[in-house]
Amino acid sequence: MSVTLVLADDQPIILYGLEQLFACEQDFHILVSCATGEETLKAVRRHQPAVLVLGLRLLAKDGLTVLRELRAERLPTRVVVFSLVLDEEQVVEAIHLGVRGVVLKDMAPKLLVQCIRKVHSGGEWLERRSVAHLLGSFRQREIKAQGDGGVLTRRELEVVHMVARGLSNQAIGKKLSIGEGTVKVHVHHIYAKLKVPSRVALLLHARTKGWV
């Protein structure tokens, strides 16, 4: 079965490199390459590719804006983020918005091909190096069998749910009518109780536990 692709990146040389890479894969079929967020949205709406390979630094509308609109429209295309750098809040929001794979641009090209194949088959690819600076050693730990909800206060559980939705500390503070500093204290306590090092690790932990 052919894997149909839409490619989106603001750098022409990156798009050209991706086109050359995927041309070597007999079952990959590139439908269109895009440099702007608006072009990307139009291409996905029109062609509904199996996979969108998405750079986050697009012109006009950035990659996260594209993800938000795709999520709102419930389009079936699966998304792989392909980026040079990622910060913690970007990864959390991208995963919340349904991204199935994350690959950094400085990684071996074959890993992007493997990622797309896995995502196309229904899996997820959060390759360790892609989020290592955010996850630390979290993915190497064995997750506890018992639930963790009982060790968190009601307010901490509220904060966990909002972090998992991609909200910043400032946004969480506004939602709960508390100061941003108070939110930071809650987040610090949650990290300590659940033994997770970052927001991304907390999101993955919450998903594993079925909290989100």
Image (cartoon, rainbow, N blue to C red):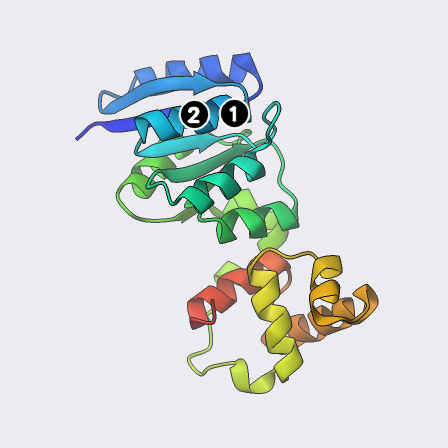
* Residue 211 horizontal side relative to residue 44, left or right: right
| CB-based contact (under 8 Å), mark 2 and mark 1 | yes
- The residues tagged by marks 2 and 1 sit, at their Cα atoms, a distance apart of 6 Å
Q: Residue 78's spot in the image, x, y percent?
A: 36, 40
Q: Is residue 179 visible?
A: yes
Pick whichever, 4 or 144, lies toward us. Answer: 4
Q: Residue at x 75, y 69 (%)?
A: 183
- Badge 2 element: helix
User: Mark 2 sits on what residue?
Assistant: 42
* Residue 21 horizontal side relative to residue 35, left or right: left
Q: Residue 181's spot in the image, x, y percent?
A: 82, 67
* Residue 78 horizontal side relative to residue 59, left or right: left
Pick whichever, 137 or 97, lies toward us. Answer: 97
Q: Residue at x 43, y 37 (%)?
A: 80
Q: Amino acid at mark 1?
A: Glu
User: Mark 1 sits on what residue?
Assistant: 38
